[in-house]
Amino acid sequence: MTETTPEVQQAPEPLVADIEQQLSALFRRARSASMMMARRVHPDMDAAGYALISQVEFMGGAGAGVRASEVAQSLGLDKSTVSRGITQLEGLGLLERIGDPDDGRARLLKLTDVGAERFNALRAQRQLEFRAIFNGWNPEDLSDLGRLLGRLNGDLT
């Protein structure tokens, strides 16, 4: 008796092309939205800075702080790139370095009070906008969208 392996099914080409086109449109909108959101937090901040403070806030949670190396790894960026962004955000008064309570030699990143206030106000506004967009969607579609985006993000890493 011979053992057979299941055949990997290929996605139909037109479906892949349509998904690629829709993702390209979504990514363009996301880049534009990131730039607009960055400017709403601070007029001199760029989209990369917005990604940095978003990640610091997400990973640092409740003001505990997060290591720059962890932020770099989660964003898939070089440490030197993150370091330049941190320096810019510190200069804008949005981010600060604090001592690590677990390691006196290490420094953690956290949003300043001003940075947290501006970022949280923007996040609240953005959530209102998403609620308005998704208001007409049924809960099953929203659940599917969240699940499938999570799967896509997992596969892309």
Image (cartoon, rainbow, N blue to C red):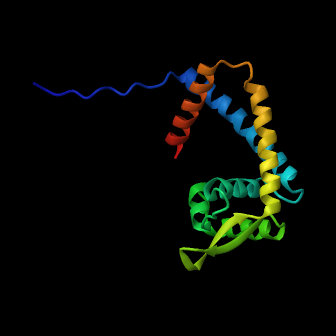
Q: Quadrant of residue 68?
A: bottom right
Residue 152 in the figure: left or right of residue 26: left
- Across and down, in percent, residue 9 comes to 40, 24
Tell me the residue at 84%/53% (across/down): 41
Q: Residue furthest bottom?
A: 105
- Across and down, in percent, residue 7 comes to 32, 26
Tell me the residue at 67%/65% (across/down): 82
Tell me the residue at 29%/26% (across/down): 6
State whether residue 82 is above or below residue 139. below
Q: Quadrant of residue 117?
A: bottom right
Q: How many marks?
A: 0
Q: Quadrant of residue 22?
A: top right
Quadrant containing the N terminus is top left
State whether residue 95 is above or below residue 128. below
Q: Residue furthest left?
A: 1
Comparing 78 with 16, the one in front is 78
Tell me the residue at 70%/72% (across/down): 97
Comparing 8 with 126, the one in front is 126
Residue 111 in the figure: left or right of residue 79: right
- Across and down, in percent, residue 46 comes to 81, 56
Comparing 22 with 112, the one in front is 112
- Across and down, in percent, residue 138 comes to 65, 18
Q: Residue furthest right?
A: 43
